[in-house]
Image (cartoon, rainbow, N blue to C red):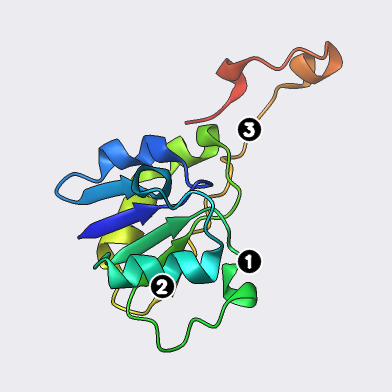
């Protein structure tokens, strides 16, 4: 698949999308295009997937009738994205033309001992696997 990353998408994810052709919008000279124009340009250029961190895209653009699939991650920091790379890659791999997919990475819960809470010391070792 040909995947277009917009300027808000975490580009570090590209290295996990093996077998796909990943391009950044900026590399095509599309860094300043607004979402509707960018989606149209991506479709006309033959991209299969538009990957963005703007999950409000569905409210801002008319998406019905689009051929390009959209994966909208939402504003997720890289530390959170890294924990869910396999789920996000699976979502990208499973999209169908015209679909909108919004993966929902959630932070893993952290567990603390009473001593660490009392001393305001929250070591990473307090996290359960």
Q: Earlier in the sequence, mark 3 or mark 1?
A: 1
x then y, percent, for residue 111: 65, 30
Q: Nearer the viewer, residue 99 or 117?
A: 99
Name the residue carrying label 1. Answer: 56
Q: Residue at x 48, y 55 (%)?
A: 52
Q: Residue furthest front?
A: 29
Measured along the vertical axis of the image, is residue 18 above or below residue 119?
below
Number of the label disc, if any, that sits on residue 99: none
Res 34 → quadrant: bottom right
Nearer the viewer's eye, disc 3 or disc 2?
2
Name the residue carrying label 2. Answer: 40
Q: Quadrant of the N terminus?
A: bottom left
Name the residue carrying label 3. Answer: 110
Q: How many numbered circles are shown?
A: 3
Q: Earlier in the sequence, mark 2 or mark 1?
A: 2
Disc 3 crowd rating (10 Å Cα; few below 14, some 14-19, many 20+) is few
């Amino acid at each position: 698949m040909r995947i277009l990353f917009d300027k808000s998408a975490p580009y570090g994810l590209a290295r996990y999308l093996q077998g796909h052709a990943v391009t950044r919008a900026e590399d095509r000279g599309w860094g300043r295009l607004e979402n509707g124009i960018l989606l149209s340009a991506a479709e006309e250029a033959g991209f299969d997937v538009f990957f963005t961190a703007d999950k409000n895209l569905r409210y801002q653009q008319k998406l019905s009738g689009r051929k390009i699939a959209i994966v909208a991650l939402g504003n997720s920091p890289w530390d959170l994205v890294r924990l869910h790379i396999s789920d996000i890659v699976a979502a990208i791999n499973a999209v169908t033309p015209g679909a909108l997919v919004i993966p929902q990475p959630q932070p893993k819960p952290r567990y603390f001992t009473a001593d660490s809470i009392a001393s305001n010391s929250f070591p990473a070792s307090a996290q359960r696997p």
